[in-house]
Image (tube, helix red, strand yellow):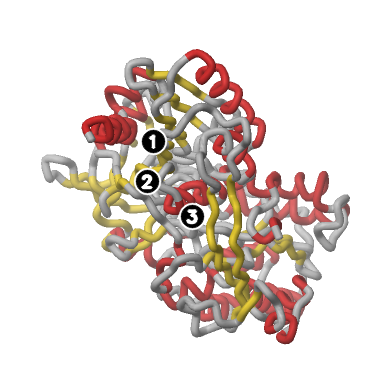
Amino acid sequence: MRYLFILLALCLATSCALKQKQYPNPAPSSDALPQLREQQMRAEHDTLVSYIKQVSPVICLNKEVRGIDFSRHAARLRKQIGPKTTMEAYLHIIKKTLNAAQDGHTSQLNTVLLDIAKKYWIPGGLVSFDSASTQNMYKYVKYLKESFYSKADLNLIYTSGSYYNLMPFSYKGKAYPAGMKLIRCNGKNIHKFVANLTQLYAPLRWDRLNNQVYDENFYWPAEIYKQDTLRMTFVDQQYRKHQLNINKNDSVTYLAKKLNLYGYFSQTDTVVTHYFEQEGIFYAKLPAMRTELGDTIKRHMEAIFARHPVNSVVIDIRGNGGGSDQTYNIFLKKLLSDTLKKDVVVGRNFSPETRKKYHLNRDSVINSNNKTFNPGVPQFKSQEMYFIKQSFNFVTPDRARFPFNGKIYILQDKFIYSSASNLSSLAQNTKQLISIGETPDLLGGLQADVLIKMLPYSKFIFRVEPQVDFTGIKKLEDVFQNHVEYPVSYPIENLYLRTISKDIFGKNFLLKNDPMFRKVLELEQIALAN
């Protein structure tokens, strides 16, 4: 049953690259694209929409909780297909349709995933197409990379319900200070503007506190640049307005040196560990859920535990875009005093596609020991689903544990995803794990292997997430499974400092300038006082 809950490691290892920007060339070339007739385009689009509607429970969540109606968006996009629709325009329609699903695991395959498919999935019989048939998709990825996105890079950040520019910059001879608040875009209130980008940007994050969608990179889609220009109105900290009218192929000049990115961590092969002697804290920065990195942390722990007393452990997963759940199992089993288990309830659509994929029918669900149509939790009204209920042991303590009974602090920001988000959610199930930081504002919880499909005429390849996590929910919005025990946000001044500082995961910066690590110190002091 393990495959129900843990994504393929190689597939998830690319999750951290999901949001990396693809910079276009000014003049994309599409000469090599295959051509389709109108009838073929319509048939393919119908296939795409039907498959997403049958497989994806996320679109039900989006409709019933967030008011995002995938079917309505898909119908509008289908109307754009006509006798004069070019292949270039059709690819944009396909891209927008996938975006309308508003799910990070429902998307086109990029070149990284295509390479993985050819190396692992096709030889392993995990997909229904062969290597030769992937060639068109490489062309589509290149074309969409060049045509769908702008070149602009403004390094915006979203915090406390508002957008700010993180770095000072100049554009066309005018200087703009750091920390300006963005209030309007193309003449519209910024939040209303971003709310209309469902087809152009995915996944948009959901700020539940302010009940609005957002993303710092909302300005990437080229289509929002009217006459190739995006008009943005800022207000600085002295309440003075600044107007920026930027061309989609232009870039700004930063007036301070940017040493770090606030986002998904780019150096996914670098583990950082420290031992803080005075506090007795072992710290490990885990940039990605890769099993070899879990092994590295375990080895570093072994060396420290052999020589020093350890009162508490800090696992820093900020910027961790996911990978294999086995990664954190490797070292947590050496630390935990009790089995980390969870009574899991996950849901999947009960549709012809899912019944065929998972070899089940109504009787097999009714007669199953772990499947049911009545899970005892709130359900979507717009889709019949079946549910899988199982008590699952995520981490079982090793017989040869470290001599440790202290707290394990999980530091997280909003740039965690997939298995990194899973680790965050597990902190709810044991008093020994404590989460500190920000919620990712993206769908979390336990998901399954994505289902991959190729469209018949164009050979366009996409993936769809078939599962959402209903564990412990009291209302439907809880399906987002975003949790943090001690919320800590970065003040904009601190984000700026993190961006221009050299060693933000070094001991000195953690102790003096990191609000999340300082929260650990505060909690440890409280524990000592009690």
Which residue does the numbered mark 3 point to in the structure image? 221
Instruction: Estimate the x, y position of residue 525 in percent, counting from the top left.
Output: 25, 30
Instruction: Estimate the x, y position of residue 398 in percent, counting from the top left.
Output: 62, 37
Q: Earlier in the sequence, mark 3 or mark 1?
A: 3
At label 3, the amino acid type is Pro
- Residue lying at 45% horizontally and 78% vertically, measured from the top left: 378
* Quadrant placement of the C terminus: top left
Q: Earlier in the sequence, mark 2 or mark 1?
A: 2
| Label 3–label 1 contact, CB within 8 A | no
Which residue does the numbered mark 2 point to in the structure image? 246
- Residue lying at 45% horizontally and 60% vertically, measured from the top left: 481
In the image, 505: left or right of 2? left
Q: Earlier in the sequence, mark 2 or mark 3?
A: 3
SS under mark 1: loop
In the image, 166: left or right of 41? left
In the image, residue 238 above or below residue 168: below
